[in-house]
Image (spheres, rainbow, N blue to C red):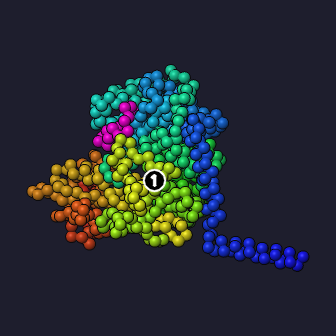
Amino acid sequence: MTLSLGWLSALLAGVFSAHILQTLCFPYFWRDLLFLLKVLRYGVRLELSKLTSSPRTVLDRFVQQAQRIPDKPFVIYEGHVHTYRDVELRSNRLANVFQESVKLRKGDCVGLLMNNEPDFLCAWFGLAKVGCSVAFLNTNIRSKSLLHCFNCCGAKTLVVGSDLVEGLHGILDVLLESNIQVWVMGGQGEHPRVHTLLDKLDAVSDQPVPAALRATTSLKAPTLYIFTSGTTGLPKAAVITHLQSLKAAAGFWAFGATEDDVMYIPLPLYHSAASLIGIGGTIELGASCVLKKKFSASQFWTDCRKHNVTVFQYIGELCRYLCNQPKTAGDQVHKVRMGVGNGLRQDVWREFQSRFGNIKMCEVYGSTEGNLCFMNHIGKIGTVGRSNFFYRLLFKYDLVKYDMVKDEAVKNSNGFCQRVEKGETGLLLSKVSALSPFFGYAGSKQLTEKKLMRNVFSKGDAYFNTGDLMAEDQDGFICFRDRVGDTFRWKGENVATTEITETLGLVDFIQEVNVYGVEVQGHEGRVGMAAVIVRAGMAFDGEKLFEHVTRDIPPYARPLFIRLQEVMEMTSTFKQQKFQLVQSGFNPSTTSDPLYVLEYQQKSYIPLTDRIYQSIQAGERKL
């Protein structure tokens, strides 16, 4: 008996000691394991679905939810409730119009140029129901970019929102001459020279088209094209497969959202965050969402209280805008319990939670076209994701040394990349494999290949180059540091410097231009700045440059600052030197080069004085 008690005591002491050791050395072990098991369970479902002759898609899930919960609100927009049945029947009608009037067929690609509204979803689902892939077009893009988007994804039809038709004025002739049919979500007679959709809805049935049209034999088949600035040049059409859509749709669920939640989606639907994670996630759960045409900081909390919002989507800027609103006694009077997004800065994160309550902020890291995703399921402030032993077994990624001055990865004597130590900053690379495929870009194998790095650690391997500098601490938390190459991020958008450089180069007095992003105190991301060499015999013309920039460049991509130079510095490989320009910033007291700032009231670029600089640093001047 005494011996048995001794063994029992020893066992209990061992278990207790192991628990203490695990708590001290591996504090996140059980939370990591449970989260990974949850994600793996969903992944196994996807893998099993891939083996069937007709795998289930996000659209299939929507149709299923419309049958299961037809009267439940799906989308709440500008005070109007659209149930799952409403959207199902209207998308059925549109599918019939697309078949009968637009003459679309399974396999066609269609461009969708619409602002956030319920009919964006109805058109998207209607097109998918007749077997079409859909190219989501950024509503900020200009004529040259729009034509490029059609060329690279092979679309021959454009569906455009009635409020965006006027924006096609300068390019409509070119579209029609290119045999691209334009259909507007409007009624007859509203828009001459284009076809109309809404006046044809009443004449068609709301019964579904044959399910075989939307069926796919492979989850790796493209269903969407979402345009991203990437690292260089014109927008690139990232291929979005059914598999990627299904993975993104599990985001809310993975973080603990349920069908009882009400989501708030203020981000543009042409981006993957709102469409794939936001709408897709709402569908996967059978939840409801509040869709905003545009984000409004002043309306945000009013909307959340009115509609009992519990989960919202964000980018880092969004939370800062909310923190900049005047404080009220009702700042913590709401039911919001979770935010899902990316780019939330540490100081804003802390201020947001301190002011608006203990809202769980769930950071997600991953690019639209990328093959890697990090999720900060622990909620540690300032980190974009979490890695651990289990994660690394499934997803092969590495952080490698990067030379910011040469703008390239550091290689060893054998020509291979070098991994950084824990805590050090490095370029994030993700191995391309059957488990983590990279589907690339439509219309250009060259662009797809350019995004890959080969022979990274051994001959024949291939890694997706994220273009992001990251660091992983001793506990496995991933922190975002910066972007490399020719892209910077401002107001939630990627800005490709090559495209802006080409646009500015069309101004007659500009000989050479180098576009880059600079940090501004109190703002996320980097704002655009351009170093310019003026042609001999000509002078800098701020008004002419202002007219050119505001006409041809989207607001978020416009260079706020101009720096005049005599000589443009180059790297040893004859690339424009950006590092020193980025480091020197836009302080007029620390550079002898003339500096100018974009001034909307005077419709010109005006000299950047110390007084203007101080007002920007103090947050008094709107950027």
Residue, far top:
203
Q: Quadrant of the C terminus?
A: bottom left
Q: Is residue 383 magenta?
A: no
Q: Is residue 300 above or below residue 386?
A: above
Q: Quadrant of the N terminus?
A: bottom right
Residue, far right:
1
Residue drawn at x 56%, y 42% as measured from the top left: 50
Q: Which residues are magenta?
A: 141-159
Q: Position of residue 569 (x, y in %)?
A: 22, 65
Q: Position of residue 409 (x, y in %)?
A: 36, 64
| Residue 464 or residue 579, whichever sits in front | 464
Residue drawn at x 47%, y 47% as measured from the top left: 272
Q: Is residue 142 magenta?
A: yes
> In the rendered image, is residue 612 in sight?
no
Residue drawn at x 36%, y 50% as measured from the top left: 449
Q: Classify residue 595 by image quadrant.
A: bottom left
| Residue 77 or residue 289, whichever sits in front | 289
What number of labels is visible? 1
Residue drawn at x 61%, y 62% as measured from the top left: 32
Residue beneath disc 1 = 432
Q: Is residue 300 above or below residue 158?
A: below
Q: Classify residue 468 by image quadrant.
A: bottom left
| Residue 327 or residue 369, whichever sits in front | 369
Horizontally, residue 68 falls left or right of residue 610, namely: right
Q: Is residue 173 above or below residue 617?
A: above
Q: Position of residue 524 (x, y in %)?
A: 42, 61
Horizontally, residue 16 falls left or right of residue 65, namely: right
Q: Position of residue 231 (x, y in %)?
A: 35, 54
Q: Amino acid at mark 1?
A: Val
